[in-house]
Structure formats: C-alpha cells, structure tokens
Image: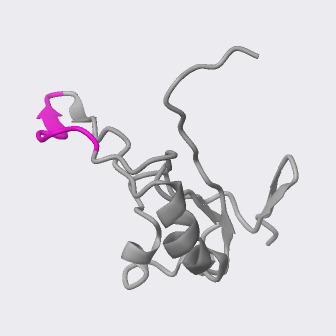
Amino acid sequence: MDLSVTLGRLQLKNPIMVASGTFGYAREMEGIVDVAQLGGVLPKTITAEPRIGNAPWRTVETTAGLLNAIGLDNDGVDAFLEHHLPYLKDIGTSVVVSVAGLSLIHI
C-alpha cells in the first residue's frame, strides 16, 4: 500500500511525522523509535542564538489536559548546523526544520 504524501516539493513516504520540540533533535529517540519508518521528523525549533527557554514549571497538569510552555529551548543555529544537521541527514527519513525569529521585520 502506498502511503506517500506530497507537501509542496516535499515527498514523505507516509503521513506520520513527529511534532517539533517533543521529539528533541531525533537523536534522543533513536533507541526507542525507528525514525526511518516515519514519514518525517521535525526537530526542535531553532533560533539564531541559543535559548534556555522558560523557567520551571514548564508544564502544568489541568483538569482539561496539560499546559506546555517550554519557551523554545534550543541550541541555536550554529550548534544545529554543526552538531545536529549531520546526524539528521543520515536518519533515513525527511527532515523539516522549524525556525523562529526574535522580531518582526516589515519588508
């Protein structure tokens, strides 16, 4: 059965993707999940400079579920390019990178 999906120019082998942030940079999950079986991976959102994110408590349980406010904790673009991207290139599935800015620029 062909489960492939096309999103613009991106071809995924199936529609199953992990959410940005919750899957780390994918390396953290390699002993738990065969990432090559996924349609794609969205590693943690990256920013120009490293960010430590919000101070604890970052998650709070409520009667309606869980509130999550991590605050874009990430290693920054330089560390992503040097350390994480080489690993991600060889995981056997598509990688979609989420990038966050610091300010709004009007063009």
Quarter the C terminus occupies: top right
Left or right for 75, reference 35: left
The residue at 19%/40% (across/down) is 58
Q: x, y percentage for residue 100?
A: 53, 38
> Could you say where residue 91 lies in the image, as x and y percent from the top left?
60, 80
The location of residue 86, given as percent across then percent down, is 60, 78
Callout count: 0
Q: Report the residue at 59% width, 74% height from top.
A: 88
Judging depth in this view, the residue of 6 and 100 nearest the camera is: 100
Name which residue lies at 16% across and 39% down. Answer: 55
Residue 94 at what x, y percent from top left? 69, 67
Q: Is 42 situated left or right of 57 in this image?
A: right
Q: Is residue 60 magenta?
A: yes
State the predominant SS element of the stretch in magenta: loop
Q: Is residue 23 rendered magenta in the image?
A: no
Looking at the image, which residue sits at the far top?
A: 106
